Structures are given as C-alpha cells and as structure tokens.
Amino acid sequence: MMWTSFIASDTAIFSTSVGGVVTVTIVASNNSALTITPSPISLGDVLVGYTPANVSGTITNNGTLGTGTYTLVATGSASASGSGTLATAGGAAAFTVGTTGALSGASGNNKVIGTVYATNSANVSGSAAAVNVTANLYQAYAGSTSVSSGTNLVLTTGSSTDGGQRAGITVSNFAASNPNFTVTTANGGAVGNATATDISQTVATVGVASNRLSGTYTYTGSVTGSAAYTDLALAGQGTVANQTWSGISVTGTVTGATSSGTADVKQAYVAMGSSYTGYGLTSLVTGGKGQTLNPTVAQIIASDNASGNTTVDMNFSANGGHPVNIFQSSDTLTLSGINPTGAPGHDGSIITDTFVLQMSYVTNANVTAAGGGYYIGWWDQAINGNTGLWVNAIAGNSNAVLGRDYVGSGEFLGSYETYITTGSGNGKTLDQQLGAFGYDPTTDTAWAVLDHNSDFEVIPEPGTYAMIFSGFGMLIGFQRIRRHSRIGKI
C-alpha cells in the first residue's frame, strides 16, 4: 500500500493506492505572548513621604495563535491588579499602576520601587516579563531667604541630605507692607532643585512704585510671598509655607513726577508719624499756565507728622472745572489725602494735619502793571451765592476768620524759608504759623501754611483785583476788597 500526503494549513490528507482516503487534522499549539508597556512604568515626580497618583500601563498579546489569559502581579511598593483574556495578534487591555502607600527611601531620579508582571495560563512560556515601576523622588523643600544690596530678594534651596535631590519652589504674590514700593518678580520667582550643594536665585527686587509723587521714599521692613512647588506634580502633593524676607532697606527718589489732567493722579503713602514734607508734582496740562517752559510746580515744603496712615493724592488741571479766571497765574492743583483731623472746616473745607504748600506761578502782566502780588487761592464753593469763588487759601483753615481771611492780611514778601529763619515765623511752631502766607518774586513761588484739602491755584492778591478793575467799577467775588500791604518782617 502506498501513502501520498497533501498538507494544507492545519489539515493533512493521506491517499492510498487503492483509493482509500484518510483525513487527519493537526491542531497547532497556543503561542500567545504577553508584554507590558511602557517599560519602565514611571510614576513621575514624587515627594518622599507622599503617595503618588496612579498611572496607566498596557498588556498586549503579541502571539499569532490562541488567546492569552493573564493575571497581573506587583512586587515591592508597586500595586497593580487585574486579569482577563486577550485576543490573538494584538489584543490589549489597560491597567492601573500605583503604590501600596507613601514612598520612602533615598531621593533621586528613576528610583525602582517595585515591578509588575503577568502570568499567562494559556501559554506559560508567553507570560509577560516583569517591568520596573520607577519614581523620581524629591526631598521636601527646605531652604532660606536673604536680602542682597537691600533690594534683591534671594531664595535658597538647601542641599539634599540623602545624596539625592531636593525640590525647588516658585514664589508669587509678593506683598510689601509699604504701598510706595512694589516688588518685581525676577527669574520667574523660582529657585531650582538642589542636589549636593545649596542653590540660590534672586527671585524679586524691591523698588519705588509707579505713579508716585516727586519725593524721597524709604522702606525698611519685610516682604512676603506665596510659595508652591515649581513642579506641578509635586505642588499637588505637598504645600510650602509662605516665604518672608526681612531686613529690607530701600531708599528711592522720584523726580519730575507730572500730571496731565484730572485722571493723571500721583500718590504718596504716608505712614502715621511720618512727614508729608518733600512730596510734589509738576503740571503737564495741555494749554496750562507756563506750558513746558515754566509749568506749575506744587510741593509740600513743611508739615506736621501724619496723625494716621494715609495716601496723599495730587493732580493738575487747567481750572479744576471751575469758571475760567483770566487772572489765574497757575494751573489748578487738586490735593487730597492729608490726614483729616475730624473737625469740620469753614465753608465745607476738610480740616487736616498742618502743612505748608508752595506753588510756582507765571507772572501776570496785569498784576505786574498794578504793582500787585500773588497768593495761593482756594476754591470756596460755599460763597458768592453758592456759585463759588477763589479766595485766599487760609480762609479754609481751622483758625480762619471768615470775611477777613477771604482776602487775608499780613502777606509775607519772601520765601517760607526766610519767613521762618529771619521773619515773623522765627521761633514759632508750625501750628503757630497756621494762616501765614506769602510769595517770593525772585523765584515766582507762593506759599501758605494750611490745614485743609482743597483745590488750589495761584491768583493775584485781592488788592490787585481792585486796582485792575477800579476803572470799570467792578468788584470780583468780594463785597468789600481792601488793599493790604505786603509785609516782609525780617
């Protein structure tokens, strides 16, 4: 008998010479082969002592014959569980990998904390090999703050104490306790991770804030900032205490601060017990008096100490929204924020700490021709039938005698410095000087000792008004205006 075989796929056909046919089916063995990806499985960045978030892995059947039946197994501090059946040639399933609890041990990158593998009951030789589960471990932040050159805020991450690495942080929302100063972030506010040595970085600088009045500003104190781990994964695991920089000492001078209109306000924060002296502003009002050649300059040249924390505001305008006065000799200054004392003022003025205001003016030909002088005027809305009028600024003081002080008397011819050095103000306290006023034709400046917030501008003294209008039989704003002598008592 002769046998002839024909093999097609998994079936073999055998034929005999006498025509008998025998069919034999050959069953191939299961060659399912399981693999786990990725390898290694990384849990990412983790703080020592914290439990990281779970991550995903994938188990795949790379065999060509038969399904794979798997059971996941984890070792060490790794955790993973699950079982199932994977179709042949690419069948896959996702699974979750985590830890059994908080991670411990030395810090460093790619630290192996356990493994994950899978058995394959359908084909033991096709079981998934173990893959490492790793983590980048960081010691929690520990460091220090310091101040360089009085203005630079330096942040330091301390070196690792286990030979590995310590996490760096980022500071934001810096806060200075003095509003005259601002903190500008540098280098993103961040200090990097440290390994064997400390790492330091300037994370911010302290300087005078914008929109300040001209003057000298001093800040001694501290700055605080909110801190968080720079690494977002670490930030979700642990918190960092706010950082504080002590020993800051900054002095800054602002010169040439300007105001172009009512909306262009400049400020100075004055702490309780501090002086208002030295703060000032220059007008850049379009169409203003003097323009760019001789713009109006206002400055507080002496003062009592502030009776409370306050913010002084100044701005210039062409006329403060008041009726145009052809004898106006300066732009209009709106001054507010001198700390109020709580006492009501005359004709609606706001009584404040005592100060000396000085304003420059542009020489008015009409005033010169009349042989008159200048003083600082205050817009008194309560007089002239409640339509308002410019009067002597001292009329708004707490010690004013209304009627008399609308015009004022005893104007000092000369600077305030001369008045207190060799004039009638010599030996007097500032409160005793309240109501004094004068002007200095050598510098084109007028000054007054005041204790109220108001709108101010330089105007001719009332006697000059009378001379200018005497030919017209007119009176301006006063029922009786008398010429008073300009006295320089030395």
Image (spheres, helix red, strand yellow):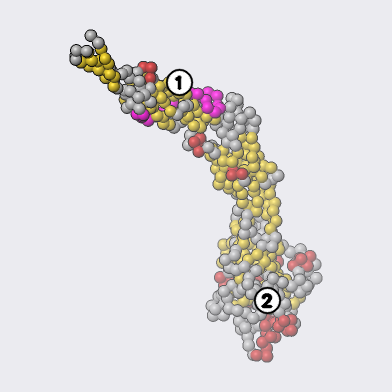
The image quadrant where one finds the N terminus is: top left
Question: Can residue 94 be found in the magenta stretch?
Answer: yes
Image point 61% across, 73% down: which residue?
318
Q: Which of the two labelled residues, at mark 1 and mark 2, occupies the earlier sequence position?
A: 1
The image quadrant where one finds the C terminus is: bottom right
What is the quadrant of residue 201 in the picture? top right
For badge 1, the amino acid type reads Gly
Dot 1: within a 10 Å radius of its alpha carbon, few (fewer than 14), some, or many (20 or more) residues? few
**In what element is the residue under mark 1?**
loop
Query: Where in the figure is residue 277, as x and y percent of width and height?
Result: 69, 60
**Residue placed under numbered mark 2 in the picture:** 329
Residue 196 seen in the current view: yes
**What segment is highlighted magenta in the picture?**
90-113
Q: Which mark is residue 76?
A: 1
| In this view, 374 is above or below 474 | above
For badge 2, the amino acid type reads Ser
Image point 62% across, 46% down: which residue?
186
